[in-house]
Amino acid sequence: MLSLQRQIGTNTLATMSYIGNQAHHLLVLEAANLGNPALCLSLSQPNEVAPGSATCGPFGESTAYTSASGQVINGTRGPFGPNFWQY
């Protein structure tokens, strides 16, 4: 990826970008089905989940959690759920 910006005059900005690739397995810059950070944060402390349950943290988007009230949350990925994610 290469981008160039140049100001022309006082109110004009010119942008040129080039994106090229040759590989078949490219690094994904944005995941297709991200986890909900607010939901994960609400399950990140031991007192917010049932005793013995895992707390939400990095790479835990597809884990099932049980809240302190007993509600089972099948992962924090949305809107497609934990069965749809990109490697």
Image (cartoon, rainbow, N blue to C red):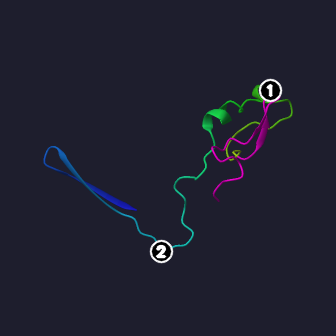
Q: Nearer the viewer, residue 64 or 4?
A: 64
Question: Is 25 in the magenta?
Answer: no
Task: Inspect the image, locate mark 2, and give the three-letter code of the amino acid beneath it.
Answer: Gln
Whole-angstrom CA distance, mark 1 to mark 2, is: 49 Å
Q: Quadrant of residue 70?
A: top right
The residue identified by callout 1 is: 68
What element does badge 1 sit on? loop
76 vs 3: above or below: above
Q: Does 63 sit left or right of 19 as displayed?
A: right
Region of the chain picked out in magenta, as a range: 62-87
At 75% from the left and 27% from the top, the residue drawn is 48
Position of the N terminus by quadrant: bottom left
Q: Residue lying at the far left in this picture: please name it.
A: 9
Task: Place residue 42 in its image quadrant.
Answer: top right
Q: Which residue is mark 2?
A: 22
Image coordinates of residue 15 in percent, x first then y, are 27, 55
Residue 69 within the segment the image draws in magenta: yes
Q: For the point 68% across and 41% down, which residue is it? A: 76
Disc 2 crowd, CA 10 A, few/some/many (<14, 14-19, 20+):
few
Q: Position of residue 66 (x, y in %)?
A: 80, 34
Query: Quick check: 20 left or right of 40?
Result: left
User: Magenta-highlighted stretch: main secondary structure?
Assistant: loop
Which image quarter: residue 54? top right
Q: Position of residue 68 (x, y in %)?
A: 80, 26
Quadrant of the rendering where the C terminus is positioned: bottom right
Residue type pointed to by label 1: Ala
